[in-house]
Image (spheres, rainbow, N blue to C red):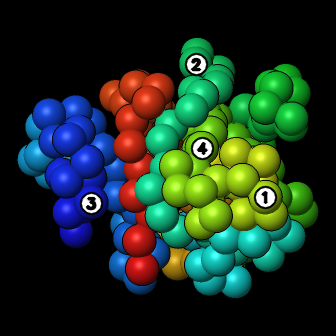
Amino acid sequence: MGKRLADSGQAGEQALVVDVPSQQLYLFESGELVGHFPVSTAERGAGNREGSLQTPLGLHRVDEKIGAGAPRGMIFRGRRPTGELAEILEGPDERAARDDVTTRILWLQGLEPGVNQGGDVDSKQRYIYIHGTPEEGRIGRPASHGCVRMTNADVVTLFDRVREGTLVDIIE
């Protein structure tokens, strides 16, 4: 796990690995595992095409961090805080009325031309994020519309720790 990141020359830096089968996100610093978090990737599985509602595979980087200082549960639309706080649902079958992006956003940019960069597979143009969700009870199993969802507490922890430019490998 994370071999491509180690081979990229970034071993001394931070790196994230999102493991789709296990629904886990792993945080590495200087090549050492320093944290892991349960996540939810796409309900429709992995895939890179625009409109697929799938989580794109491959090497990405955190291109922008959005939401520093926002209260936990803040709803974002178009990457802007709405001033509205989401009701956090903790039941495993509870679904929110909307697919709200909450608390923090780590906006991903694909780094592999034709895989997750450019054309109809461009992760940045697909608005693929790591973000908080009101559907916390569904974390740990596929539930998103393409993004990588985290609990609101976990996304704050990750947001505060990682830098823009951090590599993110989404693997199957």
Work out how far the residue at label 1 is from the one at label 3, CA to CA, in angstroms: 24 Å
Work out how far the residue at label 2 is from the one at label 1, CA to CA, in angstroms: 31 Å
Amino acid identity at mark 3: Arg
**Tag 4 residue:** 109
The residue under the point 87% across, 27% down is 82
* Residue 81 visible from this viewpoint: yes
Say which mark, if any, is on residue 68: 2
Q: Say if 137 sits above or below 117 in the image.
A: below
The picture places residue 121, in percent across and down from the top left corner, at 72, 63
Q: Say if 90 sits above or below 160 in the image.
A: below
**Tag 1 residue:** 119
Image quadrant containing the N terminus: bottom left
Q: Say if 23 sits above or below 7 in the image.
A: below
The picture places residue 55, in percent across and down from the top left corner, at 62, 69
Amino acid identity at mark 4: Gln
The residue under the point 37% across, 30% down is 162
**Tag 3 residue:** 4
Q: Are marks 2 and 3 in contact (CB under 8 Å)?
A: no
The residue under the point 79% across, 76% down is 52
The picture places residue 167, in percent across and down from the top left corner, at 38, 43
Amino acid identity at mark 1: Gly
Mark 1, residues whose alpha carbon is within 10 Å: few (<14), some, or many (≥20)?
few
Amino acid identity at mark 2: Ala
Q: Nearer the viewer, mark 2 or mark 1?
A: 1
